[in-house]
Each structure stands twice: as structure tokens, then as C-alpha cells.
Amino acid sequence: MRIRLLFFAFYRDLAGVDSLDLDLPEGTTARQAVDRVRAHGNGTSRLPAEPAVAVNQEIAGLETVLNEGDEVALLPPVAGG
Amino acid sequence: MRIRLLFFAFYRDLAGVDSLDLDLPEGTTARQAVDRVRAHGNGTSRLPAEPAVAVNQEIAGLETVLNEGDEVALLPPVAGG
Amino acid sequence: MRANVRVTRDAIGPGRVLDGVGTPDDGAVLLFQGTVRRHNEGRSVTGMRYDAYVSMAERVLAAIADEACQRWDPSRLAVVHRIGELAVGETSVAIAVSTPHRAEAFDVARYVIEEIKRRLPVWKQEHYTTGERVWLDGHAPAAAPAPHE
Amino acid sequence: MRANVRVTRDAIGPGRVLDGVGTPDDGAVLLFQGTVRRHNEGRSVTGMRYDAYVSMAERVLAAIADEACQRWDPSRLAVVHRIGELAVGETSVAIAVSTPHRAEAFDVARYVIEEIKRRLPVWKQEHYTTGERVWLDGHAPAAAPAPHE
């Protein structure tokens, strides 16, 4: 299934890209998607192993099981305002 | 000595004037000035016996001894803002 | 003088009040405006008359602003109170403050409006759709700031 | 819809935000603006870049505004957060609210700014006079409102 990962701020600087599209097996969790992208090489290996994530614009746990077309955002500590 | 009394809002409506100049003996207190004006007749008799007063723009007790040229304001309950 | 206070017969607009605050050291700007409401205690209001003991009101406003500056050290503080005849929706009082951090902006504005209501020698008379005019109840004017919580 | 929220790349001016609030039933109007400071933690700042996960930020802003409406029932609430490159003194966030009584205006504005800081997926990078650029530390993004005090 197709999953889109999004990177912001400091994580984008590490990843070197805004987003990555991954093809992952059914049943993959958010944690497994993060592990996969950290193994992807280059700067992504410096992403934290347990970042905050949002699945489809909602804060979600790392054990969340992903579905086809999900948007998984890795969120650095926020600093709005 | 010459003392000026000022009336505001509801008290002005009762007094029918903005201010009254009184000639009072040395040593007169704010309370005595209020008594004097209440005895003045007409609406002023309906002024409260113990209003809040300011002497020269500062909140003052009714026992404050007045001096020549003082401005004594009778202050209804305030409602700014 | 970082605090600026004024009693005026002119309409109060937010732009001019805000122009008096904000420095490059500030991370927060707060504007509070009190406005004339269409209803009060179930009655229909057509307008409000504000009377003041102007010379004393300016002294009390300056004292309140000074207390706020002593306590929270804002960069800028502007307070304007209007008097005269106001229509529904018009601004009777405006408080603008700028501070390095946000908590102080909220504290200053709240302090100033609460002390204005306790201490400012200002009185208001509501005008109703019936034609009746009533001086509103208020507080015995306080001489000094409320004790710190 | 009494609450209006927006994430924008355009400069935020107080006039437009205030135009969105205030009804004849309101006795209080409050505007809070967050602004870019010239100094932070002893360093000289030349500007700030705000990044956001825009689609999520708009949802979170709407949720925060809705929570404030449920809790304090303001007549109108407008929240705008800016993103992109900001100069010192520019407004990064503006919150305008109008309420029948003043306490609720303060409570709503304070709630919205605190929740924005806890939950909005926005990040800021300070630019210093040295040319250096640093992403500021923040909070682990919270999923839900802070418990009521």
C-alpha cells in the first residue's frame, strides 16, 4: 500500500525532502514506517526513533496501523504563536 | 474661607447644579461642608449624609479638615469602564 | 514616559490606541476595549452617557497605569476613557499594552480595567428605548489598589 | 459560524482581525497579537521563519476555537496565524474575541494562545545577526486540550 511521509522544520532539514512516498505491506504501523524511513539512509537515519506523528492530520500513536493512502507526518516539538 | 463643592451624575441631578461655592469658617471638615449643603434646601437635602468625597481630586475621609480654596467633590458610586 | 493616559470626548478607534504601543523588544501586544451593549439586565439600550470628574479621573488613570508599570514593567501602556454620549457599539474605554512576554500583557490589561471599575470617578447613565434614563449602580470609589491576590 | 480561523502567508493587521468581531450584544472586545522580538535568550534576531503543517494547523486551530466557544460562549472569535518569513515587529498570530462581559474575553484569548503553543503544528526558525539560523525548541505536540484548572 502507498503511504506518504511528511517532514517539517528540523526533520525536513535532516530528510532533505518535504515528503517521501513509500510502498509498504498491509498492516504496517506508524512505528514501522518511521523505522523504514530511518533505514532509508542519509540524513533520515538521524531522525528520532520515536517522533511524534500525525496520521491524516490527527496526532496518533506509533502503534497505529496504517491504511492505503494515509499521510503520516513526523512532527518536531511544536512552537507556534 | 472659600470652598467649592462639586456634584456629579445622580448627585448633580439632585443638586440641580454642577458646583456650589460656600463660605465656611476655618476648621470646617468635609462632613460639615456636606451637612451645610444638605441644609441648603431643595434637592440637596436628598443627598446622602455620608457620601464618598474627594478633596482636591483625592479620595478623603469625611473628617478631613478643609483649607481655603479646597475643591470638595461628592462622588456617587463609580461605574467606569 | 512609557504610560499614556487620557480622558476624551472623541470617538476611540483601535488604530490610534495601538499606535502608542509595541516596541522591537515586545513579543505581545494586547488591546482591550469596553463597548456599549444593546441590552443590560433585560432592558433595550439606545445609548449611554458617561460623566466624569475629569481632573481627578486623569490622576486616577495615571496612578493605575503607574501601579501596573511598577508591578509588571510593560514596555508601553496606553489607556483612554471616553466621556459624553455614546451609541451602542461605541468604545467607552481602550487599554493597549505591549510586553516582552504574553503573560504580563494579559495581567496589565486585566489589572487596569478592574481598577478603572473600582476607582475611576466616572458615572454612566443608560438611555432606554422607552425614553427613560437611569444612572447605573456602581461601587463606592476605592482610594487604593485592590490588595494583590 | 461565530469562529473564524486562518493560516496565512499575508501580513496580519489589527484592523481586519478586529473587523471580524464585535456585535451589539458585546461589552468587551479583546485583541491579542504575538510579535517577533528583536532579542531572544540574549541573541540578536533579524527575523523569523514560521513553518506549518498547514492542513493540520487549520484543523487544530478550528478545534481550539471550538473548545473556547463551548466553554465561554463568545459572540465572535477570529484567529489568524501567519507563516513564512517575518521581520522583527511583525505579527505572527492574532486572536480577536468579543463577549458580552469582559472576563470571558480574557479567558478565551488566553486559552487560545496557550493551546496554540501546546498543539499547533507550527515551527519557528530564528535568524540571527550572525547569519546563523536555529530552529527553536518547542513542546511535544499535544493531541488534546490541557485539563481545566
Image (tube, coloured by chain):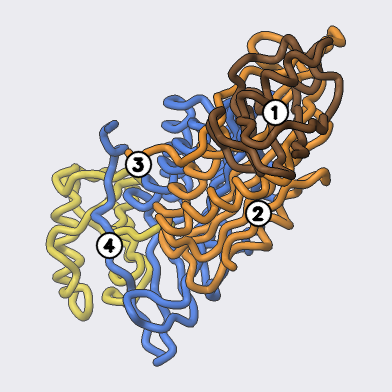
Chain colours: A yellow, B brown, C orange, D blue
Rendered location of residue A69, percent (x, y) = 34, 48
Q: Earlier in the sequence, mark 1 or mark 2?
A: 2
User: Marks 1 and 2, Cα distance to the nearest angstrom?
Assistant: 18 Å
Q: Which mark is residue D18?
A: none
Task: Kindly identify the amino acid type of the residue bearing the numbered disc 1.
Answer: Trp
The reply to whether the C-beta atoms of the residues labelled 3 and 1 are less than 8 Å apart is: no
In the rendered image, which quarter is residue C88 located in? top right
Residue placed at 72% from the left, 29% from the top? C36
The answer to whether tags 3 and 1 share a subunit is: yes
Q: Which mark is residue C123?
A: 1
From the image, state whether disc 2 or disc 4 is nearer to you. Answer: 2
Question: The numbered mark 3 sits on a residue in which chain?
Answer: C
The answer to whether tags 1 and 4 share a subunit is: no
The reply to whether the C-beta atoms of the residues labelled 2 and 4 are less than 8 Å apart is: no
User: Marks 1 and 4, Cα distance to the nearest angstrom?
Assistant: 53 Å
Please give the residue where the numbered disc 2 appears in the rendered image: C5
Rendered location of residue A19, percent (x, y) = 36, 65
From the image, state whether disc 3 or disc 4 is nearer to you. Answer: 3
Q: Earlier in the sequence, mark 3 or mark 2?
A: 2
Question: The numbered mark 4 sits on a residue in which chain?
Answer: A
Q: Earlier in the sequence, mark 3 or mark 1?
A: 1
Q: Secondary structure at mark 2?
A: strand
Residue placed at 37% from the left, 55% from the top? D121
Q: Is residue B18 left or right of residue C110?
A: right
Q: Which mark is residue A76?
A: 4
Task: Kindly identify the amino acid type of the residue bearing the numbered disc 3.
Answer: His
User: Marks 3 and 4, Cα distance to the nearest angstrom?
Assistant: 40 Å
Task: Kindly identify the amino acid type of the residue bearing the numbered disc 4.
Answer: Pro
Q: Secondary structure at mark 1?
A: strand
Question: The numbered mark 1 sits on a residue in which chain?
Answer: C
